[in-house]
């Protein structure tokens, strides 16, 4: 099995979420910038009104901010494989009627970013405005020797908004039948 990017999905009847609210500088959640200290207790994400029939709760959700929003069950599993460099940020889900969902949810926020792209075997173009990001990636290959053996999740330099998941954690999540979790092969990432 390989390292894969998590690809939260809301197929079937799982709720689709909108942007996070009540969090200043929320863009930092896509880049592994520490946020746990002072994270607002009123952080919330509303179910997206464009999908009013998708109301089921799951373990992971598609959302407009590309965050990995997870049930406590999934968050605990990820934490067991990632004992350091990880924040589990509490967030309240708000249903289509404007009421808070009782079940606890978290944003899985890895802090570790690894320069693991094999530049000799990869083909990509850097963003013209911000060259610290890939804008087009016809072929990405990872140098697995640079990936952390002791972490279940991390971010990849130049692809920070995507969360990379270790083979062992991918297998554990699949074995636990977590709903709303799908995987994107690194070779299928195109920027």
Image (spheres, helix red, strand yellow):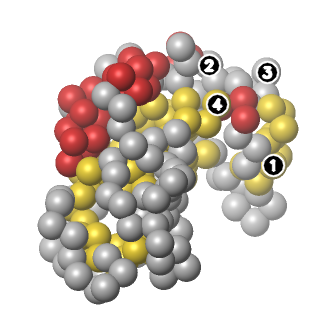
Q: Which mark is residue 121?
A: 3
Q: Nearer the viewer, mark 4 or mark 2?
A: 4
Secondary element type, mark 4 = strand
Helix, strand or loop at mark 2: loop
Q: Please report the residue visible at 25 percent of the width from the left and 66 percent of the height from the top.
A: 91
Q: What residue does disc 4 label?
A: 185
Compare marks 3 and 1 and give the one earlier in the sequence.
3
Label 1 – label 2 distance at C-alpha: 19 Å
Left or right: 140 with respect to 142? Answer: right
Q: Nearer the viewer, mark 4 or mark 3?
A: 4
Image coords of residue 25 (percent x, y): 40, 75
**In x, y percent, where is residue 102?**
15, 67
Q: Is residue 185 above or below residue 66?
A: above
Is residue 109 shown above or below 142?
Answer: below
- Closer to the chain start, of discs 4 and 2, is 2
In the foreground, 160 or 17: 17
Local SS, label 1: strand
């Amino acid at each position: 099995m390989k390292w894969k990017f998590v690809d939260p999905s809301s197929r079937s009847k799982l709720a689709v979420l909108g942007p996070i609210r009540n969090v200043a500088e929320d863009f930092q959640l896509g880049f592994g910038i520490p946020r746990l200290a002072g994270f607002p207790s009123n952080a919330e994400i509303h179910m997206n009104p464009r999908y009013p029939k998708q109301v089921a709760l799951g373990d992971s959700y598609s959302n407009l901010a590309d965050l990995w929003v997870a049930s406590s069950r999934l968050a605990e599993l990820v934490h067991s494989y990632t004992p350091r460099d990880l924040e589990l940020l509490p967030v309240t889900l708000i249903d289509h009627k404007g009421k808070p969902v009782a079940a606890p949810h978290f944003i899985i926020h890895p802090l570790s970013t690894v320069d693991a792209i094999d530049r000799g075997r990869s083909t990509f173009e850097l963003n013209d405005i911000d060259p610290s990001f890939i804008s087009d990636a016809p072929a990405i290959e990872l140098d697995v020797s640079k990936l952390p053996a002791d972490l279940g999740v991390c971010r990849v330099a130049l692809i920070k908004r995507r969360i990379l998941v270790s083979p062992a954690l991918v297998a554990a999540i699949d074995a636990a039948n977590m709903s709303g979790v799908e995987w994107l092969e690194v070779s299928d990432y195109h920027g």
